[in-house]
Amino acid sequence: MRSLKYLFIAFFITFFGFPSHEATAVEENTTMEVKLKNYLGNRTSVKITATGDYRNSGGEIFIKAGESLTLKAESAELAVYKGSQKTGSYASFKVMPVKPEASLSINGRPYQGSMTFTVEDGYIRPINAVYIEDYLKGVVPLEMPALWHAEALKAQAIAARTYALRHQSSIIDDTVSYQVYGGAAGHYRTDSAIDQTKGMVIKHDGEIIEAFFSSSNGGMTESNSNVWSRGNPLAYLSIKKDFYDSKTNWSITLDKQQIDLSKMDLSKPEEWWTSLEEKDKTVVPKLKAWLTNNGYAKKDIKITEIPLLTFTDEKTGGRVTKGSIQMNFYVRDLVDDRGKLLQQTVKLTNVAASKIRGMVGQEVMKSYLVDRSSSDPSKIAIEGSGYGHGVGLSQFGAKNRAEAGHSYQDILGFYYPDTIIEKEYGPGAGSKTDIVVKEEPNSVNMKAKTDHLNDEVGITYSLKEDAVVTLTIKDRKGNALASPVRDQTMKKGTHSAIWNIIAVSNGTYEAELSAMERGGNEGLETMAIKISRDTSAPKITDVKTSGDYSTEKANITYSINENANVTVEIKNSKGKIVGILSERQFHKGSQSATWDFKNMSNGIFTVKISAKDESDNQKTISTKISIRKTTGIVKANELSIKESRNAASETIGTLHREQAVTILAQQDEWYKVKKGSQIGYVLKKHIKK
């Protein structure tokens, strides 16, 4: 059956000129179908631009190189416009590049391969059929920073390819529900990692595995069956300590009382409603959004108390599976027969922890690994570690292992034990590699504390039984630099050693502890030690802001003098965060961020840029940006808002005399205006500034 499939593809390529990447493409049969939802969102109109000719399924040229078309969802069909001229209408259609190197941009983002356009729930939904290696070049740099160690990037490339091929039989999408995919915009370092591992996948018992991965496992990998109730535990997705994971920490701190209404007249909310806000600016907005989507749509809500937020029922790996929450709140128009506001309560008890995490926000509660929680009469405090589900490969763990000298085989061997790497397609297809599993420690609680004042590192470790101990310090290449403990017989319990670092450069080193008990069995434990004498915070310079009222977007540019994790926030005049533009690692040099202010009112906003380097030195600077949109007054008794600068175009709204509108841009005799959520065009002569 498989050979017939290949034969059909070969016939199709020969007679219809379907693009081929190389001579082995016929044998590979590795096209992915990806529904574009993440970047595109829900749009009723999109612009497509081609760098080469694209033909339709009938063989006719649909769009030429350099040409742009607009697609609109009209009455459950796709209408195609060239300029203002409608050229056709389709239930769906597919376009294919005449030459393989061509790309098709959708709203400015290029994609390779063919594209099928459909209407889904009233929105335009493209499906990109793309050669898997090109698909990966749009995945890996979005899943792992391209500037990370090459061995970590190779491990990520193989894991991403494995995951993709496991799901090849179905149409996936470009969101975190599968793998984030950014089209043809790749990076040369991740492209290289993908090319060097071309065709490689991970298998167990001859089958391609479920190669799950997450950002950080918090120091403990997790079983698939503990995270997802469906299916049996998979042998290659086990629970064990990961000493190389960065243990990304997160915390939630909430005041139980968010608004004090003890002195307020609940029968006269108009006297105080707009002046009172909840104390928390991170979790509460997400809880209000949840309420909006669960029975309180289009309601004005004030959350007054959060008396309960707990997590329980830990699984073997320490991750919680159940949670409880209670919210007391008022809704602006829900009153009793005397006109007094009625307190509303939502209480969820012992529901799935995933439900509670979805309510408070996945970027706030980054994982289910809760380390500590406390509650007193006034506050709730929860601390945890990890970012994501913790199953399979840890991206930060892979980074740290690569920097400690581990190869991509070593990395994959730890996170997917009892597996092999096999070349699924391409030159050398069928060849297999037994991947290495680094032996994990039998001793426990190995810790290190650096004292830069005295140029030494204190290392503590525990032994489960009497043993002969050797402690060796190695550099990134595996060369031994020091042996603070050599062949010493020690009793079970806790011990310590000192490593002198006066002649050691900054960098990441590995402490390897060997403990051999009387029977000759040896336990090994390794730990990464980072030496960084940097005490200076990153410098943020050349901060500039500029706004474009035609697009309603502001550009913020700045420079940082070293690699750092950067957060760019926008706050309004009340100090409320109204936008988070960046929250990830950046390379030193010039950077930029874009703020979409179309839903913002006029005012002075604060741009806050925070940069934290690898030594946890942090610098924060702020600057102001002013939004002053031009206001116009309607002069006509009734004025239609047009979809485009054409009197014959569709009317999308109506204005009346003396109404105020926001003028975004002037184009010939037209103003581009905004009224509420509507954006369109009106004749300039009917508006006075």
Image (tube, rainbow, N blue to C red):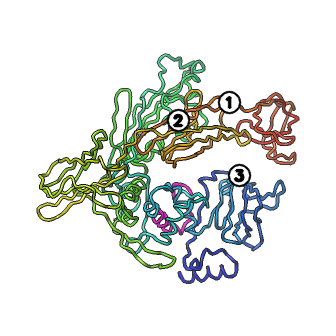
Q: Secondary structure at mark 2?
A: helix
Question: Which of the pair 421/335 is nearer the observer?
Answer: 421
Q: Secondary structure at mark 3?
A: loop
How many neighbours does mark 2 have within 10 angstroms: few (below 14), some (14-19), or many (20 or more)? some
Residue 100 versus residue 681 in the image, above or below: below
Based on the displayed image, in which of its 4 quarters is residue 596 positioned?
Answer: top right
Location of the C terminus by quadrant is top right
Left or right side of 9 for 680: right
| Disc assigned to residue 44 | 3
Where is residue 304 shown, x and y percent of the image?
48, 27
Residue 341 versus residue 651 in the image, above or below: above
Where is residue 540 shown, x and y percent of the image?
53, 39
Where is residue 86 shown, x and y percent of the image?
82, 58
Residue 433 versus residue 46 in the image, above or below: below
Residue placed under numbered mark 1 in the picture: 602
Query: Cα distance, mark 2 to mark 1?
Result: 22 Å
Quick check: can you spot residue 118?
yes
Query: Cα distance, mark 3 to mark 1?
Result: 28 Å
The residue segment tinted magenta is: 156-179
Question: Which of the pair 451/571 is nearer the observer?
Answer: 451
- Is residue 603 a member of the stretch shown in magenta? no
Mark 2 and mark 3 lie on one chain; the one further toward the N terminus is 3
| Residue type indicated by callout 3 | Thr
- Is residue 163 a member of the stretch shown in magenta? yes
Q: Say whether marks 2 and 3 touch (CB < 8 Å).
A: no
| Residue type indicated by callout 1 | Asn
| Disc assigned to residue 285 | 2
Left or right side of 462 for 647: right
